[in-house]
Image (tube, helix red, strand yellow):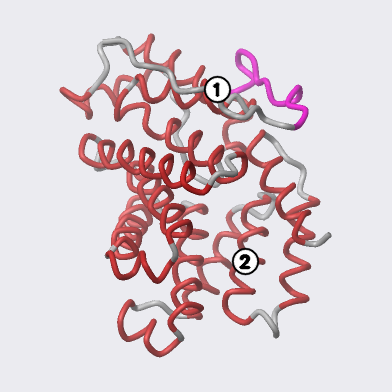
Amino acid sequence: MARKKSAAWAPFPYDASGFAYPGDALKQAWPRLHAGDCEPYPDSKRAAALLKAAGKAAPKLDAAALAEALTDAWRAFHHGDFQAAFEAGQALGPVGASVAVKAIGIHATYLVEDEEEKLRRFELAADLAQAAVEALPREANSHYRLAFALGRYSQGLSIVKALKLGIAGKVRTALDTTLELAPKHAEAHIAMAVYHAEIVDKIGAMLAGLTYGARASEAEQHIKTALKLTPDAPIAHLEHGNVLLLLDARRNEDAAAAAYEKASQCTPHDAMEVLDAAWAAEQIE
């Protein structure tokens, strides 16, 4: 059955001409583009492994066709064609969930203004990621995309409400699994830092530690690891600033501003990084 396409999404609002990555350019740029999420390059060998692992949940394609579909979807993502990337990934089921969730998640975070629509999109992203966890449990990004979607949903809902509903526990479990499978997953370290910092900020250090195992020291260690793994990524510095403010806004105001400044000055390598850097710049205006 053909999938019904959603209404047109807000377009990427900046110049994306430098992020086309045609042909072999995508493969050459891949290590830098995916230093943060450790996503393997989707060549035919990788596609064949995904088809085998997904079993009945795999799309009815051969490895070569799947590799082409995945590279096209990721190329669209990096160029800022988030709707095209999402729809292409969604059409591949759990095998395409990584690019689909990242596309809808980044677009919703930065380019959707309506709060209810944001929550709806993060719910959809979480559903796609959950299906990937079930079909591809040995893939680190199955779990990370679930943590990302639920984490963003929690932020829109309110952290306190997310704690009461048990969503925060699911985020923690997904991040723990991600880091077990991929210890150098910088974006998971960033998300773990934010997880600890947000809980400490909302319910206090003592209760956060006793009830949820959330600690300021853990937030600091995870963000330090992320910065070491991806020192040139805007999101690492941006979230460093956020973590500093969550842990002690008054004491860390200057340090947070310096972190946002670093994020804004990073050279972006794709559309997502442009949005990360632009958001950081807004924080220091």
* Residue farthest along the left direction in this orientation: 56
Secondary-structure class at tag 1? loop
Residue topped by disc 1: 8
Secondary-structure class at tag 2? helix
How far is the residue under mark 1 from the one under mark 2?
31 Å
In the rendered image, the vertical position of residue 242 relative to residue 56, given as above or below? below
Is 123 within the magenta?
no
Q: What residue do we see at 39% from left, 48% from top? A: 144
Q: Residues within 10 Å of mark 1 (few under 14, many from 20)?
A: few
Is the C terminus in the top left, top right, bottom left or bottom right quadrant?
Answer: bottom right
Residue 225: quarter of image: bottom right
In the foreground, 138 or 278: 278
Compared across the picture, whether 161 is left or right of 71 comes to: left
Q: Considering only order in the chain, which callout, 2 or 1, is on the residue closer to the N terminus? A: 1
* Residue type pointed to by label 1: Ala
* Residue type pointed to by label 2: Asn
Q: What residue do we see at 36% from left, 38% from top? A: 124
Is 16 within the magenta?
yes
Residue 177: image location, x then y, percent: 30, 55
Q: The magenta stretch spans which residues?
A: 14-26
Residue 129: image location, x then y, percent: 33, 40
Q: What residue do we see at 70% from left, 84% from top? A: 250
Is the N terminus in the top left, top right, bottom left or bottom right quadrant?
Answer: top left
Tell me the chief SS of the magenta region. Answer: loop
* Residue farthest along the bottom direction in this orientation: 206
Residue 20: image location, x then y, percent: 67, 20
Q: Residues within 10 Å of mark 2 (few under 14, many from 20)?
A: many
Residue topped by disc 2: 242
